[in-house]
Amino acid sequence: MHNVEYTIQSLIKRAIEESGIEDVNLRSYSGRCMFGRECPGITGNHEDLKAVIAEAINIMIDDVSDECLNECEAKDLVSDIMRYSEDSMGLGSVYYWSREKWDESLDEEEYDDEE
């Protein structure tokens, strides 16, 4: 059994890495009415953002099959991951999870600078 932390931020990070989608970045985001509070967000075009979310769900399905994640927790996470908010950013968009707190212990630069 793997010792994996299942948060939206950690799942999105894994999904970006495992999907190989290069034009999506995980970052902290402070959206409307958040008063400076930061949450996890992903930036990119709609197609890539939706593909990353789909990959995160596939990761959870695989982890349930491998008995790394229990089914009830996976159902809750799928529900949570689908409750993103969206803002336009010029040519791209940001999907963000305002109910989640940005985990500062994870290095934000790591996601933006990967090649």
Image (spheres, rainbow, N blue to C red):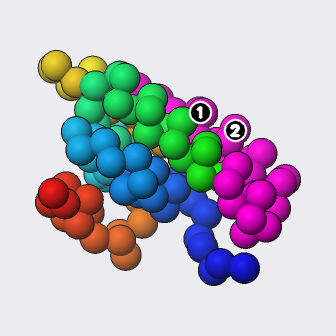
Q: Is residue 55 left or right of residue 115?
A: right
The image shows residue 67 at horizontal and vertical percentages of 79, 67
41 on left or right of 93: right
Position above or below: 94 against 19? above
Q: Quadrant of the C terminus?
A: bottom left
How would you classify the magenta stretch by its main secondary structure?
Answer: helix
Res. 58 in view = yes
In the image, residue 65 lies at what x, y percent? 77, 58
Which residue bears the numbered disc 1?
A: 83
Q: Residue at x 70, y 38 (%)?
A: 79
Mark 2, secondary structure of its residue: helix
Q: Answer yes or no: do the residues labelled 2 and 1 have beta carbons within 8 Å?
A: yes
Q: Secondary structure at mark 1?
A: loop
**Crowd rating for badge 1 (residues with CA inside 10 Å; few <14, some 14–19, many 20+):** some
Q: CA distance from mark 2 to mark 1?
A: 7 Å
Please, what is the three-letter code of the amino acid marked with disc 2?
Ser
The x and y percentages for residue 33 are 40, 33
Query: For this rendering, which residue is in front, 104 or 53?
Result: 53
Q: Relative to 76, is 83 above or below?
A: above
The residue carrying pointer 2 sits among few (fewer than 14), some (14 to 19) or many (20 or more) residues within 10 Å by Cα, namely few
The amino acid type of the residue labelled 1 equals Arg
Give the left or right position of residue 65, taking residue 114 as reference: right
Q: Which residue is mark 2?
A: 79
Q: Is residue 96 above or below residue 91?
A: below
Q: Residue at x 45, y 29 (%)?
A: 50
Nearer-the-camera pick, 13 or 66: 66
Q: Is residue 39 visible?
A: no
Q: Is residue 72 magenta?
A: yes
Residue 17: which quarter of the image?
A: bottom left
Q: Quadrant of the N terminus?
A: bottom right
Residue range (magenta): 61-86
